[in-house]
Amino acid sequence: MATILQLESSNVDADAEDILQLLPDQFQLEQAGDGKGSVLLVPRDYSRGGTIIVLVAASTKSIESSATLVFSLQIIDSVLRKSSTKVSGIKGDGFDGAIIQLTGGASILLFTTTILSTTRGRKSLAHFADGKNWRKYLKKEGNDGSFVVMPLVKDEIDLAQLKSKLPKFPSLSVSVLQQNNQFQDFPLNSPVGIPVETDLFVGKCTFVLRPNDPKNQDPYYYEQIFSKKKRRLILQVQGKFKREPKGTLYAGGEISKPLKLGLVTKGLSSLILKLLKAFCNDVHYSYGDDVEKAHIVFPALQFFSSIIITKPGGTVPSIAEPFVESNASIKARMNNSVKADWNTTDTYSLAFQTMYLDLPTWRVVQLPVTRDLDLRTFWGDSFLALVMYEGESDRKRRHVAENIQYSLMMKIKYMGLSNTDSDKDASEDDDILPWDKASRLRHSDSFIDRRLERVFSGDSAVTPDSGIFQVESDDEEEDSFLNIPEEDIGLPLEDDDEDDDKTESEYFDTRSTNSINYTSESSVYREYNASLVDNTCPAWINIIRPQKGKYVATYALNIGTADTIYRTASRFAKCKFDKEAALMSIEASCSPRISSKERKRRIIGHALSPMNQSTQVQQKIQNLIETGTKFESTFLQNNPLSLLPSKRRKNAIYTGNIARALSECHWVEEIATLTNHCITFFQPPKYKQPSLRVTRLNVVKVRKLVEKEGPNFPQHYFMAIETIGRTVYLMFASEEACDSWIEELSKQPPQQLLLGDNDNRPLSPTRKGASKGIASDAQLLSVDNPTEEFLHKSSRWSCKQRRILNCRQFSFRDQGSFEITDPSILVADTLRLALNPDLLEVENLQSFLNGVSCLKNVNVSQLPEEERLAFFLNLYHVMIMHAFLVVGFPRTNFQWKSYFSMISYQCSDDIFSLAELDHCIIRGSMNIPTVFASKLVIPKSRYTFALTRADYRINFALNCGSYSNPVSIPIYNANSLEKQLDDATTLYLKQALKVKTKGSSNSLVIYLPRICQWFADDFGSGSSKDVLSALKIQKYLSNQEQKIMSQSTTKGDGISVKYLPFSFECRNLILAETI
C-alpha cells in the first residue's frame, strides 16, 4: 500500500534535488520535470509500500504547501547530521523531529515513530497534517534555529486560571516543595506538567486523582487513566537531578506528627508493613518521635510503578500520559537485578500509581481482607507528604528529620468532606472502627498492588515471575469475605422446612403477661438457675445441611439422653412447653441486651431444666426426644473432601469437619484445613473464601480443654488455639482428631514460611527458646486480623455499636460452676496490671487480657453499695486503659460519643459500654449533664446492679484520661473509699481551680473545671453558688489565692464564676502511688 502526497513548489526540480540529497535512502526519482511540470519521487523499495511525493508547479508565488512524514529516529538523526541550512530540529513533548524547508517554498515535516505511541502525539500529528495551519504549533527556540512544539494546552498558563478549569477536590489542600523550602499550591489533574525545582531536582510533575465521576468530571484523563481501570491516583515526576543523590534515594510517604496507635491500629499497620516487606525487604519505616518523622519509604527503584530513563538526545515521554515501562524492565527492578544509577545527565520519568489510596475521601480502600480504613484512624489530623529524598544506605539507621534533603515533597492536607463530597452517611466519619467488616478481594492494576494482593491471599510463594505481570484484569470481583453481623454472622441460614415458623414466632416473641419488677428479688427471679440452663441447653449451633449448602440453626440439648441432641426452635415450640414461667424468669433475671437467639436458648434451657420437670413436662421432653432429626448423624460427620474444593485443600496436612465457637453459647460448623502456614476455616455455600484464617506463626499456645473449661457437650472434645489477643475454640467429634490437631499445631512451623526477618516471630511461652522480654512491634502485632484479635462483636448480645474488649477467653460455664476470685480483688489486680508501665511485656499483656476476661464471670449484684462503687470505679479505669491500649486515643471531641459508646465489657451476665458504665451504672442515680446536646446522646440503659448513691465527688473520681484531669488515679477500696473520694476531689481541684482578680475594680473571678458546669445539678440546684458552696473551695487554693479571695470577700466585691475549657486530648493514666 502506498500513500501519495502532493506538494506545490515554485521550483520542482530544486525541491526534488533537496529531498534526494537529504533522504537518499528513502526516495528515488521516477519522473523528472522541466521546472514547470511535475516531478515524481517514489520509495526505493516498492515491495514494502511507502509514500509517493508528487511535486507540482505552483500557480502562485505564495507557497504554503507542506507534507508530514513519520520515520525512525535513525533516519531523522541522519537528516539533522547533514548540517544543511534547509533543516531545523523539532523538540516535542514525547517525540522529536525535523523540518526540511525546500528551495521552492514547500516544507516537509519529519517525526519519529514515537509520535504515534501516545494520544497526545497522535493529536499533535493531526494538527501538523493541516497543510496550511501547522506553523502556529511550532515556536523557534535558541540560536541554532530549532523549533519546539507548542503544547495543545498552554504550559505558561496562570495556575489560578488552570485550577478553575480542572476537577474540584475541595476536601484536599495540595502543595509542592520548591526552592528555599517554600511551598506552592499545586493544581490536581493538570493536563500539563507543573514546574518543580528543589535544591536537588528540577523538572515537572502531574498529580492525578480519581474524581467521583471521572468520565464527566475529567474527560481529559478518563480514557488514558481511569477508563476500565481501578486506579485512584497517579503521580508522575519528570526531570533531572542537580547533583547525584548521596546514599540511597528513597520514595514513599511521610506523616507530619508521630503516630499514637492502639494495638488494633498498630496491628493493622504492622500487617501492612509485613506485606510490603514481602516484596521489598528494604522498606524503612518509623512511627515517629522527636528525632524521626513517621514514615514508610522504599528505595525509589522499587517504589515507583514505572521508571523510564532517557539518555541525552533521546525522546522524553509525555508527562501528560501514563509512563509505560516494559514488564521485563519492571521485573528486573523489583528483583534488584539492576543497580540504581541516579545521575545529572539523564532525564528520569517516574510514576507511582495505586488503587488503594483514595485521597479525596482520606481512606485506604479495596484492601483484600478488611473494609475501607479512614486514614485519620492512623494519624489523626496530620498531613500526608509523598516524598523522595536521599537517606542512609543502611536501612537500620534512622532517618533523622533535620538531616533529610528532599528531591520532591508533595504535601496533602485533608480538609474534611462536605455533604456533597460523598454519597456515604456523614455519621460514618465519626466511626472510630471503620475497618470492622470484611471486604472483597480486589484485582489490582499495578505491579506493587498486585504483589500485595498475592501476599494478602496467603500465597507463600510470591515471586516476580509467578503470574503477577499479567495485564490488569477487568473481570468481576470475587465473592466477598464473610461479613459477620450479629447473631447469624452472615451465615446462609435456612429454616427447617419440616417446622412451622409461625409456631416458633408466636411462642418465643410473646412477652410475659405478668407485671415484672425488674429490680425485685421475687421468687421467679430466684428460680432462674444459669448453671442448670447452661447444662441443659449449652449453645445454639449452625449445622451444615450439605445437600442445600446452607446452615440450619439448632439448639443443643442434654435432656436424659447419653449424647447431646439437636432440635430447632420451631420443633421445640411445637411441643408447647409452659412458656409463662420461662418468660417471667428470663425477663426478671436476665439482661434485656441478650440477643434474640440467646433469649431463645435461655427459654429452652429453663423450660427443660430438671427443676421444672413435672410429669407433664417429662412427657413433652420424651416427645421432643422421639421426634428425631438427622442432625445427630450429620453434625461433625461430614466428609470435608466432598464439600471443600480441591484447590482449598492444597498443601493441607489435615482437613476436617469441626465446630468453632463464635461466643460462649454459639457454635458454627465449618470445614477447616491445617497447613504448614495457617489454619483456615470455610463455610457454605461454596466454601470459596475463608471465614477465618489463623497464621501458625501467631499461635502462642495450643491446649486441650479440661471438662470444667468446656461447654456441656458429652462425647465431644475441645481444643483452644491461643494468639496474643484471642483464643479460638474448636469442637471435634472424636478425641483422636482433637489430639492430632493439637500435636501438629504444637510443632514449630518450617522456617522458610517466615515473612520478613526471622527475628520478627511472635513470642511463644510454649515453644522452646521463647523470650520473656518486651516484644517488638512485629513480634507482638504479627496478627491476621487486628480487629478480631482484640475486639469482639458477640452473637450472645445485641451489641449494636458495642465492641467487647475483654474477649481473649470465653467462659463456657456459669460463674456458679467454679470458684471465682473476689470481684474487688480481681478488678484491683487487673487495674494494677493496666497501669503497669511494662504492660507490653508479653507475660504482663497476656496476664492483663486474661484478667479482664475473668471479669466476665463475676457477679456484682450481691455486693454492698460501697464495694460496688469501688469495683465500678476501678473497672471504669481498667476499661479506659484497655481502650487506649487496643484502639488508641479518641482523635477528636466529635468522636468521643462513638468511642465511649463502642468500648464495652461483658461483666456480671451483661454488657455495657464506657458511656453506660459512667452514666447508667456509676452515676445511675445522679443527674444527667446540663449541656443540651449531651441529653440527646447519654445512654438510658437500665442495669440491676446500678448504684443508688449520689455523690458529687464521683465526678472527680472518674478519670477519662483527658489532659483536663489529673494524670494519676488510685486503686479504690471499699474500706477507705470516703478518704479516696476526698483525695480525688482535692487532687482534681488543686490542679484545675484558679482564682484571679479582673480589671481596675479587682473583681474576683473563680475558674472552675468544666465538669462543674456539666454536672452542676449534682452540687445542688445547678447554680454556680451551689457549686461553690458544696465544694468549699478555699481549702483547695494556694495561700496567695486564699488571700486574694479573703480580701475580695471583705470588701464586698462581686464574685463571678467561669469554667475552664475541657481538653479532649487524652493520655495514659498512672498509678497515684507512684507519684
Image (tube, rainbow, N blue to C red):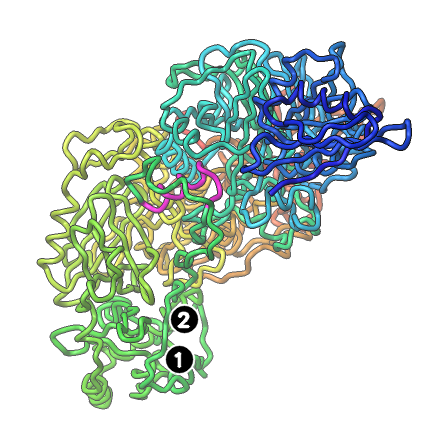
- Residue at (41% x, 32% y) in the render: 328
Q: In this view, does 738 lie to the left or right of 1062?
A: left
Q: Nearer the viewer, residue 1040 or 305?
A: 305
- Residue at (19% x, 73% y) in the render: 634
Mark 1 = which residue? Answer: 508
CA gap, disc 1 and disc 2: 9 Å
In the image, is residue 456 part of the stretch drawn in magenta? yes
- Residue 152: which quarter of the image? top right
- The residue segment tinted magenta is 444-458
**Quadrant into which the C terminus falls:** top left
Say if 133 sits above or below 310 in the image. below
Residue 985 seen: no
For residue 596, the mark is 2
- Residue at (54% x, 13% y) in the render: 402
Q: Is residue 880 left or right of residue 96?
A: left
Which amino acid, mark 1? Phe
Q: Which of 141 and 1070 is in front in this view?
A: 141
Which of marks 2 and 1 precedes in the sequence? 1
Q: Position of residue 289 (x, y in %)?
A: 49, 22
Say if 1010 sits above or below 641 in the image. above
Principal secondary structure, stretch drawn in magenta: helix
- Label 2 environment density (alpha carbons within 10 Å; few <14, some 14–19, many ≥20): some
Check whether the beta carbons of the residues at disc 1 and disc 2 lie within 8 A of each other: yes
Q: Where is residue 863 in the image (x, y as percent from the top left)?
A: 36, 55
Say if 100 sits above or below 973 in the image. above
In the image, is residue 12 part of the stretch drawn in magenta? no
- Label 1 environment density (alpha carbons within 10 Å; few <14, some 14–19, many ≥20): some
- Residue 748: which quarter of the image? top left
